[in-house]
Amino acid sequence: MAFEIIFYRKESGRSPVEDFILRCNEPEKVEIVAHLDVLSQLGFKARRPLVDYLEDGIYELRIRVVKKQIRVFYFFFHRDKIVITNAFVKKSTKIYVKEIEKAQRFREDFMSRS
């Protein structure tokens, strides 16, 4: 069973993930789309190194393109949907608390409007 991929949208209609993807170069876009496709096929069965569970129901899709590491945050909605919240380029080994908190805020907003 394939999971439906949904891009989170703010009340304004803008999608942080779509905005991020539009700023990426072509090889990055191709890799992001390919990884999202694999994620939609695997869903809950996806494991490291493709994905990692972070906390509080938030997961990260782990993408490496040349020397960049891209992280795409998501959560599961119902049993057949994956909501993609935000993404960024990881530049260090530090924990990215602000990005995780952003994903949590976007999830709360999504749930309140669903």
Image: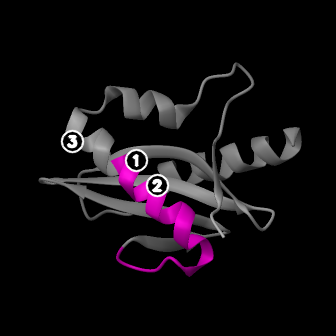
Find disc 2 in the rendering and name its residue. Answer: 36
Q: In the rendered view, would you say 113 is above or below 67?
A: above
* Contact flag, marks 3 and 1 (Cβ < 8 Å): no
Q: In the rendered view, would you say 103 is above or below 39?
A: above
Q: In the rendered view, would you say 104 is above or below 54?
A: above
Amino acid type, mark 3? Pro
Find disc 3 in the rendering and name its residue. Answer: 27
Where residue 20 sits: x, y (%)?
41, 33
- Determine whether the residue tagged by mark 3 lies in a helix, strand or loop: helix
Is residue 81 at least partly visible in the picture? yes
- The circle drawn on residue 112 is none
Mark 2 surroundings within 10 Å by alpha-carbon count, few (fewer than 14), some (14 through 19), many (20 or more): some
Mark 2 / mark 3, whichever is N-terminal: 3
Please say which color scheme the image uses. one colour
* Contact flag, marks 2 and 1 (Cβ < 8 Å): yes
Magenta region: 32-49
Where residue 38 sits: x, y (%)?
45, 64
| Quarter of the rendering occupied by the N terminus | bottom right
Q: Between residue 114 and residue 105, name the one nearer to us.
A: 114
Residue shown at the point (67%, 69%) measured from the top left: 56
Q: Let me know if residue 43 is in the magenta part.
A: yes
Quarter residue 82 falls in: bottom right
Quarter residue 42 falls in: bottom right
Find disc 1 in the rendering and name its residue. Answer: 33
Residue shown at the point (65%, 61%) measured from the top left: 3
| Quarter of the rendering occupied by the C terminus | top right
Is residue 96 at least partly visible in the picture? no
Mark 1 surroundings within 10 Å by alpha-carbon count, few (fewer than 14), some (14 through 19), many (20 or more): few
Residue shown at the point (53%, 74%) measured from the top left: 53
Residue shown at the point (23%, 51%) measured from the top left: 91
Q: Let me know if residue 39 is in the magenta part.
A: yes
